[in-house]
Amino acid sequence: MTAIYDSIGAGYDRHRRADPGIAADLFEMLGAPGAGRYLDLACSSGNYTIALAKLGYSLSGLDISQRMLTAARAKFGTPAGFWVG
């Protein structure tokens, strides 16, 4: 199956960024200890995955679109098990 974002995802991050206020709200709503490990389903290019990781969460990002995962890796690198497809 081909993910729609494999074809329309070129330039995705030119128009989309993690909003710091939304990231802070997500951090507060999760209310989970930073010591856990969490999964961001449909992480896209990882904008919020990365924002939450910078706030102390250990996350893995999962997306069906290889283009989006490639963009996420380019922005944040590829720690073991961080981005899966």
Image (tube, grey):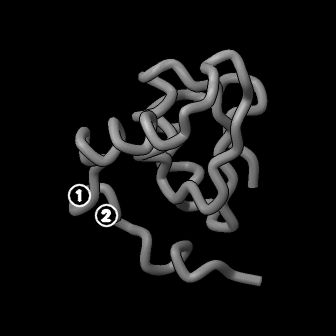
Q: Quadrant of residue 41?
A: bottom right
Residue drawn where x is 47% and y is 33% of the image: 52
Q: Is residue 66 left or right of residue 50?
A: right
Q: Which residue is mark 1?
A: 14
Q: What residue sits right under mark 2 in the picture?
A: 11
**Closest to the observer: 66 or 55?**
55
Q: Secondary structure at mark 2?
A: loop
Screen quadrant of the C terminus: bottom right
The amino acid marked with disc number 1 is Arg
In the image, taking residue 57 as reference, residue 22 lies left or right, namely: left
Residue count near mark 2 (Cα–Cα under 10 Å), binned few <14, some 14–19, many ≥20? few
Number of numbered discs on residues: 2
Left or right, 27 with reference to 65: left
* Element on which disc 1 rests: helix
> Do the numbered discs 1 and 2 sit on residues whose CB atoms are within 8 Å?
yes
For the residue pair 15 and 70, the one nearer the viewer reads as 15
Whole-percent x and y of residue 62? 69, 53
Image disc number at residue 41: none
Packing grade of label 1 (10 A; few <14, some 14-19, many >=20) is few
Q: Toward which corner of the image does residue 43 lie, by quadrant?
A: bottom right
- Give percent across and percent down for residue 65: 62, 66
> For the point 22% across and 62% down, which residue is it?
15
Q: Relative to 41, does residue 2 appear above or below in the rendering?
A: below
Q: Residue at x 69, y 33 (%)?
A: 82
Q: Using residue 24 as the reference point, say whether residue 3 is left or right of it.
A: right
The residue under label 2 is which amino acid type? Gly
* Quadrant position of the N terminus in the picture: bottom right
Q: Position of residue 84 (x, y in %)?
A: 74, 47
CA distance separating discs 1 and 2: 5 Å
Image location of residue 44, percent across then percent down: 52, 59
Q: Residue at x 55, y 73 (%)?
A: 6
